[in-house]
Amino acid sequence: MYIKLNPSTTFSNTMSVVSETIDRIKSFFHHNKEVFDHHKVLVVFVLGGPGAGKGTQCARLVQEFGFCHLSAGDLLRAEQHREGSEFGDLIRQHIREGKIVPSEVTVNLLKNAMKAELEKHEEETENGWGNGKGRFLVDGFPRKMDQAHIFDETVCESKFVLFFVTTEDVLLQRLLERGKTSGREDDNEESIKKRFRTFVETSMPVVEYYRQHDKVVEIDATKSIDEVYERTSNAVKARLSI
């Protein structure tokens, strides 16, 4: 659905339409079971504080294991700039303030991206793809408990969680350095510190939830990229019995 705004359309009116759209997405998830069969579609969540190196490690996992890497953050940033997006202003505001975008919006973007990838690889027969099969790394997700429940229950039950950990000082220095060239509006010290607080308050309960279900693989992200990847690769092989 696309919304064409006219000069008289107020921000309040727009947010009202967005709210109605989110309600419709909620209704869809409420009345549907798994979209993708978790026996055929492998989903690995990738979590860690901002700057933990999740994207770097995911890129290597894609090369070695044939995963499709979906970054929740990248999908949200693309959606906020997509012409005609009914969620653009909402996403932009949440990212700027270091807040989490409504779960239904993020889950819906992920579901659509997974569907597109499965259709694209339908004829393949290698690396766990084809005939409805696929492998996904979902990076930076779930950020809070309702995202975890909505995704596992209505999109596809996740296999396990890769959790990259290091100190807040290390994360801050990495992000400030990245901000010199990234062009991301949230790579500034004020936004970074808000993101740290948000992660601790909302994402750590998610990690603990999956830890209680023996689904968390914790990786020390302080070490070099190669050292981190060696442990990450071995952990994935062990979990997938490769």
Image (tube, rainbow, N blue to C red):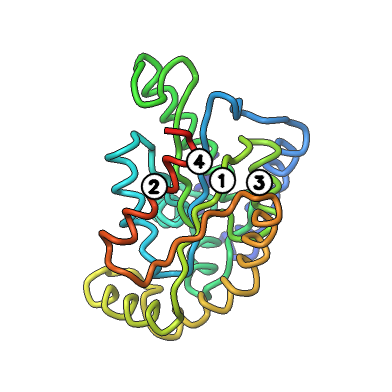
Left or right: residue 180 compared with residue 208: left
Q: Nearer the viewer, residue 5 or 203?
A: 203
User: Relative to 13, is 88 on the left or the right?
Assistant: left
Q: Amino acid at mark 1?
A: Phe
| Res 239 label | 4
Amino acid at circle 3: Thr
Marker disc for residue 21 = 3
Q: Is residue 173 left or right of residue 39?
A: left
Query: Of the residues tagged 1 and 4, which is closer to the observer?
Result: 4
Q: Secondary structure at mark 3?
A: helix
Helix, strand or loop for disc 4? helix
Task: Tell me if I can see residue 7 in this picture.
Answer: no
According to the image, label 1 marks what residue? Answer: 160
Q: Nearer the viewer, mark 4 or mark 3?
A: 4
Disc 3 or 1, which lies upstream in sequence? Answer: 3
- The CA distance from mark 4 to mark 3 is 38 Å
